[in-house]
């Protein structure tokens, strides 16, 4: 029961981010096709994948402890830490891609008659 509670809390921490990424994805689907949209969609996909994989990586030690593999947790600590560092780097790339798409969209001239 304690494992289930811990897993639900871990999901609860990521749920607002997943909802925000989902809303951003839906808003982006209604924009004209082009390079900027493709980059923004790729960035959102990358951020979504990083969030989900990060959740799985956070759950691995809990599952190992629940299975009684205490020695595995200690040996996997370095590997899990490296995985979290790699996910942080990918998350940074996703944010940079989103910022690039935003800058490109803001630099484009607006159609006449639009405020």
Image: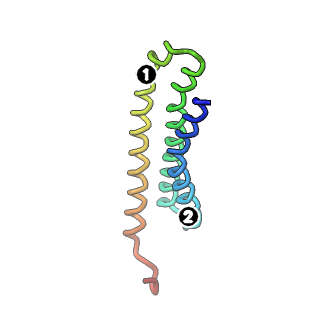
- Quarter the C terminus occupies: bottom left
- Mark 1 and mark 2 lie on one chain; the one further toward the N terminus is 2
Is 2 in front, or is 103? Answer: 2
Q: CA distance from mark 1 to mark 2?
A: 39 Å
- Quarter the N terminus occupies: top right
User: How many residues crowd around disc 2 within 10 Å: few (fewer than 14), some, or many (20 or more)?
Assistant: few
Is 78 in front, or is 98? Answer: 78
Q: How is the image coloured?
A: rainbow
Q: Which residue is mark 2?
A: 27
Location of residue 5 with respect to 30 vertically, above or below: above
User: How far across and how far down the image is residue 61, in percent?
Assistant: 51, 25
Is 50 in front, or is 13? Answer: 13
Residue 93 falls in image quadrant: top left
Location of residue 81 with respect to 68 vertically, above or below: below
Q: Residue at x 43, y 22 (%)?
A: 77
Location of residue 44 with respect to 1 vertically, above or below: below
Q: Residue at x 41, y 51 (%)?
A: 95
Q: Viewed as shown, does residue 100 lie left or right of 13? A: left
Residue found at the far top of this picture: 71
Residue found at the far front of this picture: 1
Q: Residue at x 43, y 48 (%)?
A: 94
User: How far across and how far down the image is residue 35, in percent?
Assistant: 49, 59
User: How far across and how far down the image is residue 114, in percent?
Assistant: 46, 83
Q: Viewed as shown, does residue 8 lie left or right of 106? A: right
Under tag 1, what secondary structure? helix
User: How many residues crowd around disc 1 within 10 Å: few (fewer than 14), some, or many (20 or more)?
Assistant: few
User: How far across and how far down the image is residue 73, in percent?
Assistant: 48, 19
Q: Which residue is mark 1?
A: 77
Q: Viewed as shown, does residue 7 lie left or right of 113? A: right
Is 107 in front, or is 54? Answer: 54
Residue found at the far bottom of this picture: 113
Under tag 2, what secondary structure? helix
């Amino acid at each position: 029961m304690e494992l289930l509670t811990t897993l639900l809390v871990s999901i609860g921490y990521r749920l607002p981010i997943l909802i925000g990424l989902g809303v951003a994805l839906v808003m982006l689907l209604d924009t004209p096709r082009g390079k900027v949209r493709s980059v923004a969609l790729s960035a959102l996909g990358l951020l979504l994948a990083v969030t989900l994989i990060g959740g799985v990586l956070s759950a691995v030690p809990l599952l190992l402890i629940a299975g009684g593999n205490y020695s595995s947790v200690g040996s996997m600590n370095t590997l899990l830490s490296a995985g979290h560092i790699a996910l942080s780097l990918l998350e940074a790339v996703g944010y940079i891609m989103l910022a690039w798409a935003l800058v490109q969209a803001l630099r484009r001239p607006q159609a006449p008659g639009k405020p």
